[in-house]
Image: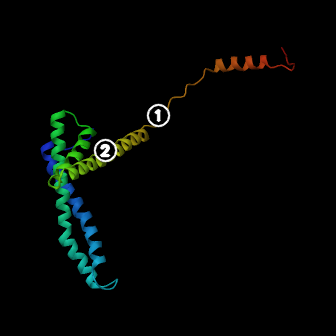
């Protein structure tokens, strides 16, 4: 499958990657939000100051939330790999569902069920797209396997077929 770091180290690796994604994406989102919600004209200095203040305050918060999600997801994924003794898309789907439920555990059973279902569906879509992309890219790399081989006909058979067609057609028509 894919060459990834072994499980105990993978958890911290995934947490760091998730923190980085959350920090960058959250900073972009917070910067736009801060710019739009600050007073002043379009090119006002207060808009840019408000944008930077929102990035400073909210960016790390988004990063921390993503890191928590990534850490719980990776820990569950590693646990499922250890229990099931195989690494397949079902581990990721179950990990997404369990992570979604665990992270909202204090909000009640209805929210847990909805979040778990949403996490499982999102991970199923991600895994499905990944499998389709892998299959498609594999076919692109080796186009001969993707096509059905066309059998070549023996030239001597073609000559016999042509002779039988010519013999069967004459200028007179027979009617029964």
**What is the CA distance from the residue labelled 2 to the residue labelled 1?**
30 Å
In this view, 121 is above or below 153? below
Q: x and y percent of residue 77 in the render?
A: 19, 43
Which image quarter holds the N terminus? Answer: top left
Q: In front: 1, or 127?
A: 127
Residue farthest to the top, as pictured: 176
Q: Mark 2 highlights which residue?
A: 124
Residue drawn at the location 26% of the way across and 50% of the way down: 114
- Percent position of residue 10, x then y: 16, 47
Where is residue 37 shown, x and y percent of the image? 28, 78
Indicate left or right for 149 with 53 as reference.
right
Sequence-wise, which precedes: disc 2 or disc 1? 2
Looking at the image, residue 64 lies above or below residue 114: below
Residue at point 32%, 47% (across, down): 126
Q: Quadrant of the C terminus?
A: top right
Q: Is residue 6 visible?
A: no
The percent coordinates of residue 108 (x first, y second) are 17, 53
User: Tag 2's secondary structure?
Assistant: helix
Seen at 23% across and 61% down, the residue is 22
Q: Which residue sits furthest right?
A: 172
Residue with the mark numbered 1: 144
Label 2 vs label 1, nearer the camera: 2
Would residue 131 be visible to someone looking at this image? yes
Find residue 136 and report its image quarter. top left
Viewer-proximal residue among 112 and 155:
112
Query: What is the secondary structure assignment of the residue under circle 1?
Result: helix
Residue 132, relative to residue 100: is it above or below?
above
| Quarter holding residue 30 | bottom left
């Amino acid at each position: 499958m894919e060459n990834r770091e072994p499980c105990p180290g993978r958890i911290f690796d995934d947490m760091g990657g998730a923190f980085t994604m959350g920090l960058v994406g959250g900073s972009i989102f917070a910067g736009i939000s801060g710019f739009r919600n600050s007073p002043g004209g379009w090119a006002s200095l207060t808009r840019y100051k408000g944008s930077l203040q929102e990035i400073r305050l909210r960016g790390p918060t988004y990063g921390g939330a993503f890191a928590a999600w990534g850490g719980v997801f990776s820990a569950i994924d590693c646990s499922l790999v250890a229990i099931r003794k195989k690494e397949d898309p079902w581990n990721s789907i179950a990990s997404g569902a369990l992570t979604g439920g665990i992270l909202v555990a204090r909000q009640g059973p209805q929210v847990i069920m909805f979040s778990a279902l949403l996490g499982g569906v999102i991970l199923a879509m991600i895994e499905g797209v990944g499998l389709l992309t892998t299959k498609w890219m594999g076919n692109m790399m080796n186009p001969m396997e993707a096509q059905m081989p066309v059998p070549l006909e023996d030239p001597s058979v073609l000559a016999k077929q042509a002779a039988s067609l010519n013999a069967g057609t004459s200028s007179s028509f027979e009617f029964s």
